[in-house]
Amino acid sequence: MLQLIAKRLAAMAVIIFVLTAVLFLLQKMSPLDPVHAMLGGNASKQAVAEQRHRLGLDRPALDQFWHYLGGLLHGDLGTSFRTRRPVSTDLGAFIPVTAELALYGLGFALLLAVLLAFGAVLRWPGAGLFRLVLMIGASTPAFLLAIGAILIFYQQLGWLPATGRIDLADAPTGPTGLLTVDGLLHGRFDVTVDAFRHLVLPGFAVAVGPAVSIGRVLRSSLVGEQSADYTRTARAKGLTEARVLRSHVLRNSLGPALSMTGLQIGLMCAGVLVIEQIFALPGIGQYTTQSIPVADFPAIAGVTLLLGAGYVVINTIVDILQAIADPRINV
């Protein structure tokens, strides 16, 4: 197990290093001059030269890369051309919104996936209709699903809010930045409930597609394990089908589902950036869409590196969890 963890961590470090190198190379290939972007087109040649020297852009490319890498290790992602603030500071303000939506989206996806898989295997009443609804939702683009949810649950029924994070004006701003958590920490259950209501529609819009993919893989694994010898032995002892599934089959079926979950998280992150725009959530998606039109490369690179590194870390964790769930995995 320790050898497996060491291999996965080493591979994670190499992939993040390569991603960093690619981003640095793209920045060097960009026709945009960061000095002119910071100082403006009317800056004098002397001012440009001084700023270029201050930023270390007059040094060899390899030295610049090691300096860039060293800055990343200390949390320095550069300075945004648009906001004139450190990118790490900007991301610190936007990350909690995206993280909260992603966490709830993942939670909803796993819940729907388990219901889809167990409902089909145990033949629950209404499982076929539930599966049909999820299949239709999964075949619909996330942005269209979000718009449809707004029209139905906000405009027609008035059950759930459609924009923003919260309607309360005096919501706490810390310590985590996650409103549902901060509300609990401050004893403000009204904040937690209102923030959760704002997350339901965007969370399910993000979750439906991954839920179907994860649920189908989990269902196939459960069906395959049901015919194994140990399963027949458990049934022969008089255990109910639900008990057999929960106590014996589920753990051996988690490996493929965990792999699919790791893959779907990357797609979910892309979906979150789009859904944020539809529901007017001030997260990383909004920060990115504001940075692209003005060619704010440090901001774009910072978001790319953050999402890429997060995806690699999550898949590394998934690999380790697979080994814990199935000790036969040792490579």
Image (cartoon, rainbow, N blue to C red):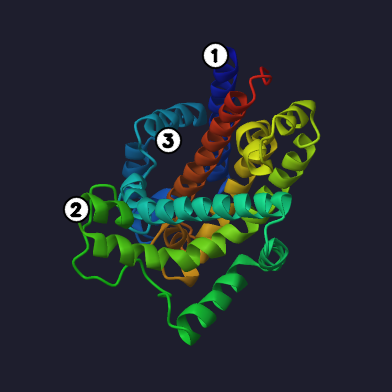
Q: Position of residue 102 (x, y in %)?
A: 48, 53
Cα–Cα gap, marks 2 and 3: 50 Å
Residue type at the position of mark 2 = His
Cα–Cα gap, marks 2 and 1: 40 Å
Q: Position of residue 318 (x, y in %)?
A: 58, 33
Cα–Cα gap, marks 3 and 1: 45 Å
Relative to the observer, which residue lies in front, 224 or 206?
224
Compared with 114, 160 (above or below) is below
Judge depth for marks 2 and 3 and give the one in front: 2
**Circle 2 residue:** 186
Q: Is residue 321 left or right of residue 123?
A: left
Q: Position of residue 326 (x, y in %)?
A: 64, 25
Relative to the observer, which residue lies in front, 146 or 180?
180
Residue type at the position of mark 3 = Asp
Residue type at the position of mark 1 = Leu
Secondary structure of the residue carrying numbered label 1: helix
Badge 2 vs badge 1, beta-carbon distance below 8 Å: no
Q: Specify whether residue 292 is in view.
A: yes
**Circle 1 residue:** 2
Secondary structure of the residue carrying numbered label 3: loop
Q: Is residue 137 left or right of residue 33?
A: right
Compared with 164, 210 (above or below) is above
Judge depth for marks 3 and 1 and give the one in front: 1
**Circle 3 residue:** 58
- Quarter of the rendering containing residue 42: bottom left
Compared with 112, 237 (above or below) is above
